[in-house]
Amino acid sequence: MLSVLVLPATFALTGLLLLNTSLPTTKGNIMVKLQTIVLRVAGVFGSSALAAVAGGAIFGVELWKSAAIAGVVSASKVTEALLRSWSEDGVLSKEEVAAAFGKANK
């Protein structure tokens, strides 16, 4: 039940954050940014879910439950990082988005 509530909230908050990024905004650019972030969050969800399926199988947890828990937790972490970055100054930079997804320049 929790995943049914958290995932749509994650996508909604991410969409709101995208509307207020420091990236140049053109007519179609907002939809491109939104699509990119949503697909990246879905990718994080999927990659974390795949890793948890094996661990869940060892402990006898149903596969869909272990995948859902791992996916929700990872998507929530990304959303939290985006929200924390946005709350500092009300703007998301490319670097802050990259850092939220673990692609920060070192």
Image: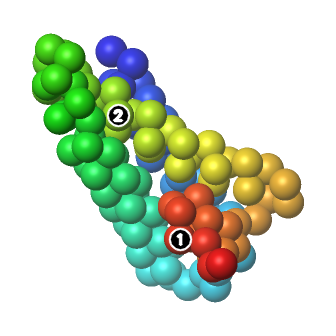
Give the position of the N terminus as an image quadrant: top left
Mark seen at residue 103? 1
| Residue at screen point 61% across, 65% down | 99
Write the residue at 76% across / 65% down: 91
**In the drawing, does residue 56 fall left or right of residue 6?**
left
Label 2 sits on residue: 70
**Residue 80: where, in percent of width, then height?**
62, 43
Q: How is the image coloured?
A: rainbow
Residue 85 seen in render? yes
Query: Quick check: 5 above or below 101?
Result: above
Few, some or many C-alpha atoms within 10 Å of disc 2 (few <14, some 14-19, many ≥20)? many
Is 89 drawn above or below residue 45 in the view shown?
Answer: below
Residue 4 position by quadrant: top left
Q: Which residue ends up furthest to the front in the rendered image?
A: 58
Q: State how many labels appear.
A: 2
Closer to the chain start, of discs 2 and 1, is 2
**x, y (%) of residue 72?**
39, 34
For marks 2 and 1, give the CA distance. 20 Å
Relative placement, left or right, of 12 versus 85 is left
> In this view of the protein, which residue sits in the foreground, 45 or 9?
45
Q: Find the residue positioned furthest to the right.
A: 89
Q: Is residue 13 visible?
A: no
At label 2, the amino acid type is Ala
Between 81 and 29, the residue placed more toward the observer is: 81
80 vs 29, left or right, is right
